[in-house]
Image (cartoon, rainbow, N blue to C red):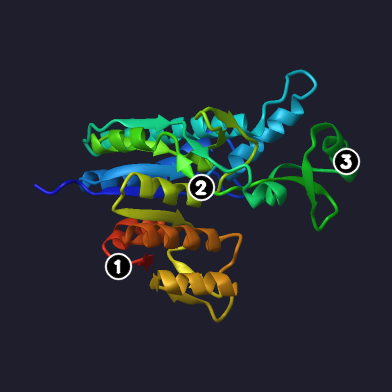
Amino acid sequence: MAEPQLVVVALGGNAILRRGDDGSITRQFTRADDVMRHVARLAEDGRHVILTHGNGPIVGNIVLRNEAARSSIPPMPLYIADADSEGGLGLLLQMSLHNRLREAGLKRSVVTVITQCIVDRADPAFSNPTKPIGPYWTPVHAAELARTEGWVFAENADGSRRRVVASPRPLRIVEAHSIGRIAAAGDIVIAAGGGGVPVLEDEDGMLTGVDAVIDKDWASALLACETDALALIILMEAEQVFLGWGTAAARPLDRLTVAEADRLLSSGELERGSIGPKVAACAEFARETGRDAIICGCGVLEDALAGRAGTRIVP
């Protein structure tokens, strides 16, 4: 009997909370249920699954709550907010997927692992923070926070300010071996939520949290490499990658080699802030493992695995 195939499936933060949603837990559960039905089908097919997810809107809400209570409760560091969102969203997805598995008659456990990702303090991202998080501030309030907290702000088109933080590349996932063992035993693992918690490691192996936000696509690709996954699958709203997205000349891409992906990324033909990181992370996985990566919409997940939908990035 063949060994079950292990796949890493990465959800975007907007899979749970979208623009226009009221942000309630009820609404987030409804969104999660829709997505988890597709993930449950992978388990029905006998696959082993590691699930990662973004936390974009949610970690911003945590930071906003943090700031609103600043006068009465000591504010938490950003890396603790990262862990907060990873645990909360992990529970939501874990409960939803548990129920979808039961509906399918499957008795597979779902486990959430708070995941630490080692980053390099010398990463250029720390000297050039670009990842926006949290609320919008007036210039006066932002200047005060910059003075008292050392935060860095970027100016928006309307003159408001928003905090920007570093988004360093993850180098190694502390819990990767444990995550792989759990998945190999047949349980579904939810890990590296929001890119995981960024930590620094000293020469003695001691870990320290650092305020940053890791891109979940890069964390997912690294986790897929470190757990020897057969495939990396990144889910998004669109069903596949397009060149010229949103224009009359938009063209779908069914298949890209790593070399083709690198060329499109270096030429700027793929948007840097949206699809670009997904393609780059998939290309890195394919380059490192010699295996395929897939970018697709949640509704065509099964077809994409069978080669009938989505965009496949190959070595």
* Residue of label 1: 308
- The residue at 30%/67% (across/down) is 308
Q: Amino acid at mark 2?
A: Lys
Question: Mark 1: which secondary structure?
Answer: loop
Query: What residue is at 59 percent from the left and 66 percent from the top?
Result: 271
At 43% from the left edge and 73% from the top edge, which residue is drawn?
Answer: 259
Is 44 on the left-hand or right-hand side of 237?
Answer: left
Q: Nearer the viewer, residue 304 or 282?
A: 282
Image-quadrant location for residue 235: bottom left
Q: What amino acid does circle 3 point to?
A: Ala
Residue at disc 3, secondary structure = helix
Q: CA distance from mark 1 to mark 2?
A: 26 Å
Q: What's under tag 1, amino acid-wise?
A: Arg
**36 up-or-down from 295: above or below:** above
Res 70 quadrant in image: top right
Task: Where is residue 279? Give x, y as percent.
Answer: 48, 63
Q: Residues within 10 Å of mark 2 (few under 14, many from 20)?
A: many
Say left or right for 234 vs 156. left
Height in image: 80 above or below 42?
A: above
> Can you name the residue that lies furthest to the top here?
72
Q: What is the CA distance from the residue labelled 2 to the residue labelled 3?
A: 30 Å
> 10 Å neighbourhood of mark 1: few (<14), some, or many (≥20)?
few
Q: Nearer the viewer, residue 259 or 25?
A: 259
Task: Please name the residue that numbered disc 2 is placed on.
Answer: 216
Q: Position of residue 230 (x, y in %)?
A: 28, 53
| Between discs 1 and 2, the one toward the N terminus | 2
Left of 257 or right of it: where is 60?
A: right
Q: Position of residue 289 (x, y in %)?
A: 34, 57
Q: Quadrant of the C terminus?
A: bottom left
Task: Say whether marks 2 and 3 touch (CB < 8 Å).
Answer: no
